[in-house]
Image: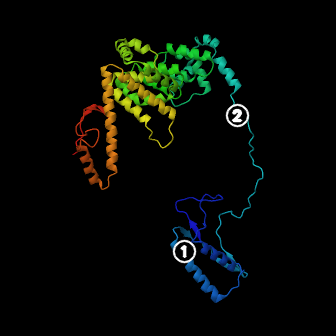
Amino acid sequence: DLKVWPGKEADGTEPTTTPGKTPSSGKERMQKLAKLAKKHRNGYMPEIDWLDRLTFREIEHINEAEKRQSNYLYLMVEFPQVTLNGVNHSIVWYGQDGDEVYQFRSQAEMVTVPDPEILQDNLVEIKHHKLARSVRSGISDKDVKPNAATRDLLHTIVSYPPTQNMTLEEQDLVWRHRFYLSSNKKALTKFLRCVNFKGTSSEVQQALHLLHSWSPMDVDDALQLLGPGFTFPPVRRYAVTRLQQAPDEDLLLYLLQLVQALKYESLVEITEAYKLSLTKTPEDSLTSSDRKTEGSEEELETKNMDLATFLIHRACVNSMLANYFYWYLMTECEDHNMMKPDSKVKSMYICVMKRFLQQLKCGPPEWQEKRNFITRQDNFISELVKLIKLVAKESGNRKKKTERLQAILADPEQFKINFSNFEPFPLPLEPAVMVKAILPE
């Protein structure tokens, strides 16, 4: 009798987690009888015909009783037997070519040899990269014009999707023809992917000088420069200058992705900016905000902003952006994942949210009004969550819980907020809709 494990594949290891015979208090007697029966079959015990029939019948009754009391499933395998020359033989099925002798090899055909240089940088490629990106080669690259085949290849490289990586040969080709591609705004992201911003200072200086003289890229292409592949601060700030061209309606479409991109910003700079905002007085912030409002659009666009400062400024000006920006930040600050969150990233989002609320608090009256409705939204959601949790703990069916919910909503003294009549505020999911009450019925 073998124990069966339904819905589980045998592991075949030792010790195994799916044993065919498991020790238990109920099976000790069965195993002892099975060993005695095996000794009897092998001729180690004398055969007494009438006693053997009674004994084996009793053993079958004991096994059946033990199986019925057990919670496990058992499989009994019985092989047919034949007698040949007075010797009993069990017939066992075996696979095709199962009697072939396996040739065991004491040594493997493939021998692994450790390579100490497998994770090291290629010195030849490093030297080639330095020579190709040196300042001396930049003088001659200005006059380089691609032929027809090279021009088609450059066009193919520029049309690569953002997720496709370029080979080293393609990167060198784009770098060599960078002045020719500087008039193509779609080629800027490919050019920046060719630059090693952790390499030599001459290469980085050339790239930054050419970045500001490149044909300005579109706003949707600038989103690529805010991803994890571009962590160099000047490049990310250039992307922010391009985002300043987008109206609030378009920025609202990218807002969720932009909030997600904050995790790739410098955590130290965001923390320092938050600490600096705490030292400002309301009069200083009010004067600064008035200056921004009265200043020209060109001055705002040329200002060197990081992503967090840009999003906070645009959210302070637009109520719709302020609503979604706050709740996107709140979602990142709360821990809904079972996995351990990144504490540094979470603290960064908390700093951005506190800095945003501090900016609204110290700003002009219209900014303070935005902070007031955000506070009312937060309080309303908190009390509503408490209400739902209270009703969920109630015993009874769905109808009783619904009646209990309606009764609590109609009671103005049950919670801090009177759900049937409160001060109007924009709905968090749809700020264009103002809510002022919840009808219990």
* Residue 422: quarter of image: top left
Q: Residue at the front extreme?
A: 413
Where does residue 124 sit, x and y in percent of width and height? 70, 24
Amino acid on which the number 2 mark rests in the picture: Ile
Q: Which residue is mark 2?
A: 118
Where does residue 379 sit, x and y in percent of width and height? 33, 35
Left or right: 57 in relation to 328: right
Where does residue 178 sit, x and y in percent of width and height? 56, 17
Which one is nearer the viewer's eye here, 185 or 226? 226
Res 104 label? none
* Residue 43: quarter of image: bottom right
Q: Residue at the bottom extreme?
A: 50
Circle 2 crowding by C-alpha within 10 Å: few under 14, some 14–19, many from 20: few
Q: Residue at x 35, y 20 (%)?
A: 363
The CA span between labels 1 and 2 is 62 Å
Mark 1 vs mark 2: in front = 1
Which one is nearer the viewer's eye here, 143 or 355? 355
Quadrant containing the N terminus in the rendered view: bottom right
Amino acid on which the number 1 mark rests in the picture: Glu
Q: Which residue is mark 1?
A: 66
Q: Residue at x 44, y 41 (%)?
A: 336
Q: Is residue 158 above or below residue 300?
A: below
Mark 2 secondary-structure assignment: loop
The chosen color scheme is: rainbow
